[in-house]
Image (spheres, grey):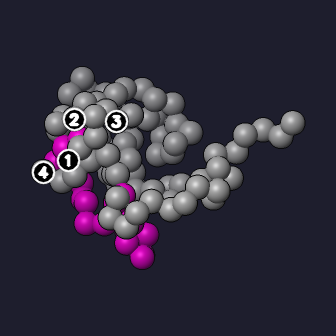
Amino acid sequence: MDAWNPDQLRRMLPPPPPGSEAQPTRSGGTGGIQRGTVVVVQTPQANVRDQPSLNGTVIDQVESGDRMRVEQATTADGRLWLRVTTGAGISGWISSSTVRPQ
């Protein structure tokens, strides 16, 4: 039996509706989110990971309305990831699709 590959599953799923996820710019940029930007969690919960990838280990969770300052932004796995520090002082990566600029 072959190992499960998340990239294969993503290719089998239909794309998300337009505007449902923050998208990087064509140049691979950060969609206007820069270091120092304050973002607010807009989903009920969001995972904070140790690396900018869905395969990264979840090291913390944040709740709707939590605010965090962006330390860095990068694209990986076709997503825009933001390095943030949580209210608990934990620094990690969160998908930009779960937050909005304040």
> What is the CA distance from the residue labelled 2 to the residue labelled 3?
8 Å
On the question of residue 51 being in view, the answer is yes
- The three-letter amino acid code for the residue at tag 1 is Val
Q: Earlier in the sequence, mark 1 or mark 4?
A: 1
Numbered disc 4: secondary structure: loop
Numbered disc 3: secondary structure: strand
> Residue 92, image x and y in percent?
37, 36
Mark nearer the viewer, 4 or 2: 2
Magenta stretch: helix, strand or loop mostly: loop
- Neighbor class of circle 2 (other Cα within 10 Å; few <14, some 14-19, many 20+) is some
> What is the CA distance from the residue labelled 2 to the residue labelled 1?
11 Å
> Residue 48, image x and y in percent?
38, 34
- Neighbor class of circle 3 (other Cα within 10 Å; few <14, some 14-19, many 20+) is many
Residue that numbered label 3 is attached to: 46
- The three-letter amino acid code for the residue at tag 2 is Ser
Residue that numbered label 1 is attached to: 39
Q: Residue furthest bottom?
A: 26
The residue range painted magenta reads 21-41
Q: Nearer the viewer, residue 14 or 46?
A: 14
Residue 13 part of the magenta-drawn span: no
Q: Residue at x 16, y 48 (%)?
A: 38
- The three-letter amino acid code for the residue at tag 3 is Ala
- Neighbor class of circle 4 (other Cα within 10 Å; few <14, some 14-19, many 20+) is few
Numbered disc 2: secondary structure: loop
Q: Earlier in the sequence, mark 2 or mark 3?
A: 3
Residue that numbered label 4 is attached to: 102
> Residue 97, image x and y in percent?
34, 51
Q: Earlier in the sequence, mark 4 or mark 2?
A: 2
Q: Nearer the viewer, residue 59 or 10?
A: 10
On screen, residue 100 versus residue 56, left or right, reads: left
Numbered disc 1: secondary structure: strand
On screen, residue 25 versus residue 1, left or right, reads: left
